[in-house]
Image (cartoon, rainbow, N blue to C red):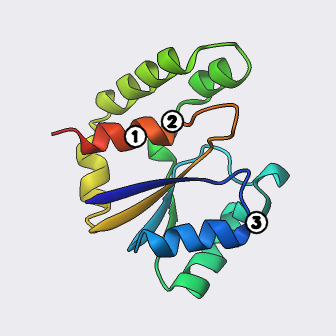
């Protein structure tokens, strides 16, 4: 499986959709816990559920089983938790639910784009998820 992580933030629609095309994605999996607020812009769940199949002719799925818990996310965004500790804690959450097998059985595609929340100032759990899924 080829996995590409894209951020839903700080990008134009053109850059976003071109990156999905370039990845030759078979599916887009949105692993954001919150993807309905105005900060998501054109990447709100309802919009992507329309845009991705219409523009790219591939499925779009919002799957919070691969999002961090609300408590962990708040600790990172508001509580000053370092990305290193956040990533380790997120990974433990994934391991507790056998996340690798769950993801691979849910999305048996050759090329997957995972939508995360990275910005110029912060990393995303999607980066940790990609690393976790690619480990042998």
Q: Is residue 110 above or below residue 62?
A: below
For residue 125, the mark is 2
Label 1 crowding class (10 Å Cα cut-off): few <14, some 14-19, many 20+? many
Say if mark 1 contacts mark 3, CB within 8 Å: no
Mark carried by residue 129? 1
Q: Quadrant of the C terminus?
A: top left
Would residue 113 be found to the left or right of residue 122 on screen? left
CB atoms of marks 2 and 3 within 8 Å: no
Q: x%, y% of residue 91?
A: 38, 27
User: Which residue occupies 71% across, 51% down?
Assistant: 9
> Which picture quadrant has residue 51?
bottom right
Vertically, is 104 above or below 76? Answer: below
Position in image of residue 72 (x %, y %) = 57, 22
Q: Are marks 2 and 1 in contact (CB under 8 Å)?
A: yes
Secondary structure under the numbered disc 2 in the rendered image: helix
**How far separated are the C-alphas under marks 1 and 3?**
23 Å
Decide if residue 100 is in sight here.
yes
**Coordinates of residue 55 in the picture (x, y in percent):** 60, 85
**Number of numbered discs overlaid on the protein picture:** 3
Q: Which mark is residue 42?
A: 3
Residue 99 visible (yes or no)? no
Q: Mark 1 or mark 3: name the one nearer the start of the chain.
A: 3
* Nearer to the camera, 8 or 92: 8
Residue name at image x 45 percent, y 43 percent: 66
The relative height of residue 57 versus residue 15 in the rendered view (above or below) is below
Say what secondary structure mark 1 lies in. Answer: helix
Q: How far apart are marks 2 and 1 (CA)?
A: 6 Å
- Residue 1 is left or right of residue 128, and the answer is left
Crowding at mark 2 (Cα within 10 Å: few <14, some 14-19, many 20+)? many
Q: Left or right: where does residue 6 sit relative to residue 89?
A: right
């Amino acid at each position: 499986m080829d996995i590409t992580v894209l951020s839903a933030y700080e990008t134009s629609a053109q850059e976003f959709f071109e990156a999905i095309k370039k990845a030759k994605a078979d599916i887009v999996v949105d692993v954001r816990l919150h993807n309905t607020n105005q900060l998501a812009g054109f990447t709100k769940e309802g919009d992507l559920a329309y845009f991705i199949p219409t523009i790219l002719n591939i499925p779009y799925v919002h799957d919070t089983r691969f999002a961090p818990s609300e408590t962990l996310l708040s600790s990172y965004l508001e509580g000053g938790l370092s990305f290193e500790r956040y990533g380790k804690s997120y990974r433990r959450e994934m391991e507790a639910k056998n996340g690798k097998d769950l993801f691979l059985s849910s999305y048996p595609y050759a090329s997957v784009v995972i939508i995360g929340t990275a910005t110029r100032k912060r990393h995303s759990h999607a980066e940790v998820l990609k690393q976790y899924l690619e480990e042998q």
